[in-house]
Amino acid sequence: MTSKSISCEKARAVCIVKTMAKAGHFPSRETEKEAWFPSPFRSETQASFKVSKTKNLWYDHGEGIGGNVIDLLVRLYKCSVREALGLLAEDLPSFSFHPQTPIRPFEEKIAITRIRPLGHPALIDYLNGRNISLVVAKEFCQEVHYIIRGKHYFA
């Protein structure tokens, strides 16, 4: 266990969806407010494990149980609350202590003005700096010029 510690209050705010991903479980369907997973506790063909993104709580409809991220880790790893807190504390930099908020769709318009073979000196310098062969890059990449917020860019 690590010397880092985390309070139960902060631990309960750790995003369950991210915790599930860290444990190797990914949603089979997802909306802004919820994510549905196949249960991490048993084998199943249809997702019955729901995570409320707004409340940051989970509920397993197949077993009729649910809870917060601490309850999930205790059940998932068959460990104590103290050990679950230790698992969360070990990954402090990679966990967010805010419930997952829905991502707003990108509202800025991007206008692609030109697509051409790689040739801009800055892009070629970038490739050379990373030891990427220009012949290989030209086979898989193109130079794209675009406008966003009235400014011209290329990539």
Image: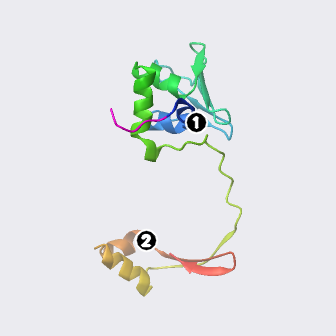
User: Which numbered dot is residue 141?
Assistant: 2
Q: CA distance from mark 2 to mark 1?
A: 42 Å
Q: How many marks?
A: 2
User: Which numbered dot is residue 13?
Assistant: 1
Q: Residue at x 45, y 30 (%)?
A: 85
What is the x, y in percent for residue 49?
57, 24
User: Is residue 72 depicted above or below 20 in this figure?
Assistant: above
Q: Residue at x 43, y 36 (%)?
A: 5
Which secondary structure lies at badge 2? Answer: loop
**Residue type beneath disc 2:** Cys
Along the line of sight, which residue is nearer the eye, 88 or 134?
Answer: 88
Q: Residue at x 35, y 76 (%)?
A: 127
Circles 2 and 1, Cβ within 8 Å, touching? The answer is no
What is the x, y in percent for residue 8?
53, 30
What is the x, y in percent for residue 134?
33, 78
Give the quadrant of the N terminus: top left
Q: Is residue 142 left or right of residue 138?
A: right
